[in-house]
Amino acid sequence: QVQVVESGGGLVQAGGSLRLSCAASGIIFRINDMGWYRQAPGKQRELVAVITSGGSTNYADSVKGRFTISRDNAKGTVYLQMNRLKPEDTAVYYCNMEISSGLGFLNPWGQGTQVTVSS
């Protein structure tokens, strides 16, 4: 079984920082794109940031300059460093990876981790 598991969410005051992690496990040959998404109550899930296997990154306009995505290929892990957090960043954050595994090509989602930013 191939899965991804997020960690690092929590409650923080506006202006504070959090670091999210997401680790893949299972029989994995290669991980292509790794991404972070978020879903606020009553809203659709949206892309926050993505990083390719080559290290190229792309961010939602709302988080540019505040969030940084990075990856550790040896650990099969993607990170999201979130600085200068705002109340509007409050959401459940999900990890998604494009994985070539012993079970074929998979695109698993994590269970999500709650980020709450108080004003």
Image: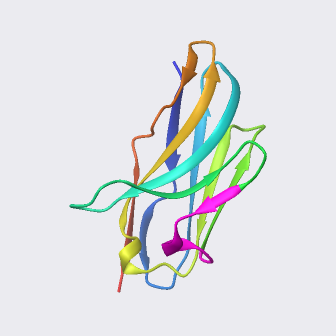
Q: Count the numbered circles shown.
A: 0
| Image location (x, y in percent) of residue 40 | 30, 62
**Quarter holding the C terminus?**
bottom left
Figure colour scheme: rainbow
| Image location (x, y in percent) of residue 39 | 34, 57
The answer to which of 8 and 43 lies nearer the viewer is: 43
Q: Residue at x 73, y 54 (%)?
A: 56
Q: Is residue 108 above or below residue 111?
A: above
Q: Magenta stretch containing residue 61, yes or no? A: yes
Q: Is residue 51 above or below residue 19?
A: above
Q: Residue at x 30, y 55 (%)?
A: 44
Q: Is residue 46 above or below residue 108?
A: below
Q: Residue at x 51, y 57 (%)?
A: 8
- Magenta-tinted stretch: 57-66
Q: Is residue 91 above or below residue 87?
A: above
Q: Residue at x 63, y 60 (%)?
A: 58
Q: Is residue 93 left or right of residue 18?
A: left
The answer to which of 108 and 4 lies nearer the viewer is: 108
| Image location (x, y in percent) of residue 98 | 59, 33
Q: Magenta stretch containing residue 116, yes or no? A: no
Residue at the farthest top position = 103
Q: Is residue 1 left or right of residue 115?
A: right
